Image: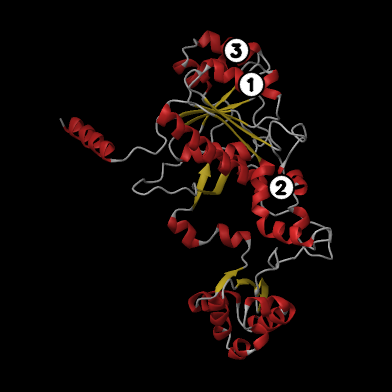
Amino acid sequence: MKTTDRTSTKARAARKSPAPPLAGIRVIDLTQVYSGPYCTFLLAMAGADIIKVEPPQGDSLRNRKGPGGAALPFAMLNANKRTVTLNLKDEAGRALLLRLLATADVLVENFRPGVMDRLGLGRDEMRARFPKLIYASASGYGSDGPYRDCPAMDLTVQAFAGLMDSTGFADRPPVKAGAAVADFLAGAHLYGAVVTALLRRARDGEAMATEVAMFDSLYLSLASSLGLAMRAGDQFVPRTGNRHSGLSVCPYNVYPAADGYVAIICNTNTNWHALVQALGRPDLDADPRFATMAGRIAHMDEVDAEIGRETRKHGRDALFTLLNQSGAICGAVRTLREVIHDPLLHESGLLREIDHPDYGKLVIARSCLRFSDQPDLAYEPSHALGADNDAVFGWELGLSDDELTRLRNAGVI
């Protein structure tokens, strides 16, 4: 009787908990490295059932070797997913994938354009075979156009999109962004495209194909730099270092503190007034050269020199607190280790330390998508290669133990 009561209580509690937004949606994930896996990670953390399909040798990111932390990206981006292995170059492997797709709502892939067609798994063929399947693709430069066949990685897309040319200092060579911005922007946009397609299908029953190119998602992020380049015409547009990339906001820079650096931006005169008052320099507010944004831009070197003269009198963290409390906009320039071990970020649940079964102690991040009245899903570390082969191919697709053994021996799974 007590067991029944406990079970009933659990059942009632489960009924009261709202289902995750994407509960009941199954996604077949053929993606590797960053852009596609980030999209499917967001889908997983919103409640979708993700079956990650890897080649028998594994996602190339899983196998990446290097000094300290090379495995962290794989662990972070493949949490809350089931993983199976399939050799899609083998007819038997493709046949198993088709059986999986018959149970799915979404297929996500990020192969180079043409690869899926050569495998007999292209968009048009899959949409004809599975009319309710949403076919989502990420690529470097899109599936059509003059650059479709160019291999693309985050570094090369940053270079080709002009991001590297706008990053760094005018008297030095171009540099890449420290973050893999092309990959992650593409992944976030692909998530939005998939959810949009799911909404369309729920509304009128039509399944859409959707595609995001890394180049396309990155280009619009260069809005400030693009404006400067368009105004400059054929003239060389210098890299602006830590200043505003369109040179249309001042102050906007990284300034020295007594023990580090802070980033300060004044979008409005109100921000400027707050900054100079907090720094004890009301004379700067009274200086006619600095009375307007246009004036401060025209005297950018002088503004930066005056602000830097004052900021170096304060400790970094004290300056961060002082300026933000005053209404100025300031960010302390922190090391990655400081961010990783920020106790407030751990208390908020954004970051957490886990003991990963394959990689040991890691600090991982939850999804940045938050839903009201929806608790975070329980975090499930990324699975070992092929860990769910028996569950998916055996229990769900009905293959016998002998069939699974035969497929393993043949290198299909």
Spatial distance from mark 2 to mark 1, Cα to Cα? 38 Å
Q: Amino acid at mark 3?
A: Leu
Spatial distance from mark 1 to mark 3, Cα to Cα? 24 Å
Mark 1 = which residue? 122
Q: Is residue 265 left or right of residue 391?
A: right
Q: Single out the mark in the foreground, 2 or 1.
A: 1
Position in image of residue 254 (x %, y %): 67, 71
Give residue 67's mark.
2
Q: Single out the mark in the foreground, 1 or 3.
A: 1
Mark 1 or mark 2, which is nearer the start of the sequence? 2
At mark 3, the secondary structure is helix
How many residues crowd mark 2 within 10 Å: few (<14), some (14–19), many (20+)? few
Q: Quadrant of residue 48?
A: top left
How many residues crowd mark 3 within 10 Å: few (<14), some (14–19), many (20+)? some
At mark 2, the secondary structure is loop
- Indicate how the structure is coloured in the image: secondary structure
> Is 86 situated above or below 78?
above
Position in image of residue 207 (x %, y %): 49, 26
Q: Is residue 322 visible?
A: yes
Q: Amino acid at mark 2?
A: Pro
Of residues 335 and 170, which is closer to you in this image?
170
Mark 3 = which residue? 407
At mark 1, the secondary structure is loop
> Is 238 situated above or below 190?
below
